[in-house]
Image (spheres, grey):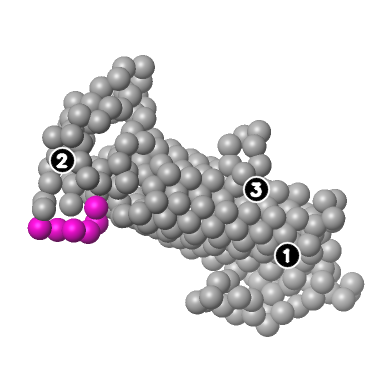
Amino acid sequence: MITITPKKEFTVPIQAECINADTFTGKTIEEIKKLTITEGKETITLNDAFNITEDKTTKTPNITLTGDFSKVKRIGQGMKTGEIIINGNAGMHTGEKLSGGKIIINGNAGGWTGCEMKKGTIEIHGNSGDYTASTYRGTSTGMKGGSIIIDGNVGTNVGCYLQGGIIKIKGSAGRYLGYHMSDGAIYVEKNCASRAGAFMTGGKIIINGTIELMMPTFTIDSIKPKVKIDATQNAHGPFYVFLGDIAEHGTGKIFALKTTNPTLATYETFL
């Protein structure tokens, strides 16, 4: 196991995609220390910014980060195997294009966490920023698979262009949840801001709390007693089921819990 701790408090962003189980595999501790990162505009080594130690008696997790990594970007980028545990806050783009393995964040996560993710698991035991599990602005390649579980709240545009996989949010979600999503599932245990499912063409969004405003381009379809979140979990209703986004000829579904959304009762006249 490799343990990494910051040598100082960082004041400018650090790009550190080399902090990755795939990159570390087969390297000695001295070779790992010499891997290059950038601090602002300056190219430095991992050893310049971090204390790095190795415990050969412990096989997993592969990498443990302890301290404030909120300015350290791209941890675990493109990782295919292995495990990273971050005991503290994590910077933007953590787990970007993750293709396997597991990342656990025992703190808050920055924006674009799990961006364009393909496989694997990310657990966030805090809040997560804007564009979690989304795509870059101007592109349409969102998360395609795997799972992201967030204990806290999330920002805006989470699950943007989602094409597969599961996102579970135990707190509340910001605006434009599931924007342009075409597949996959998003579960929100608490409340959701407006514009959920905008331009949605497929997949499902399940809201167990209050939805601030249902998009006018969604039409009520039915009331269901429960909904399947994934292979291991169901959400128990009853739920209003809305279809849309009709403006996109979409077949996506938004499930809104009936008991927490009394303002949606007027739609029952259309059933």
Q: Residue 123: give x, y in percent of width and height.
A: 40, 58
Residue at 33% over, 24% down: 38
Of callouts 1 and 3, the N-terminal one: 3
Of callouts 3 and 2, the N-terminal one: 2
Q: Residue 27: give x, y in percent of width and height.
A: 20, 41
Cβ atoms at labels 1 and 3 below 8 Å apart:
no
Query: Would you name the residue on which mark 1 appears?
Result: 253
Q: Is residue 207 magenta?
A: no
Query: Would you name the residue on which mark 2 appears?
Result: 28
Residue at 60% over, 79% down: 236
Q: Is residue 6 left or right of residue 260?
A: left
Q: CA distance from mark 3 to mark 2?
A: 40 Å
For the residue labelled by badge 1, is the local secondary structure a helix, a strand or a loop? Answer: strand
Q: CA distance from mark 1 to mark 3?
A: 15 Å
For the residue labelled by badge 3, is the local secondary structure a helix, a strand or a loop? Answer: loop
Q: Is residue 58 magenta?
A: yes
The segment highlighted magenta reads 57-62
Q: CA distance from mark 2 to mark 1?
A: 50 Å
Name the chief secondary structure element in magenta: loop
Label 2 or label 1, whichever lies nearer to me, is 2
Cβ atoms at labels 2 and 1 below 8 Å apart:
no
| Residue 24 appears in the rendering | yes
Classify 10 Å Cα crowding around label 3: few (below 14), some (14-19), many (20 and above): many
Instruction: Check the picture and name the quadrant holding the C terminus.
Output: bottom right
For the residue labelled by badge 2, is the local secondary structure a helix, a strand or a loop? Answer: loop
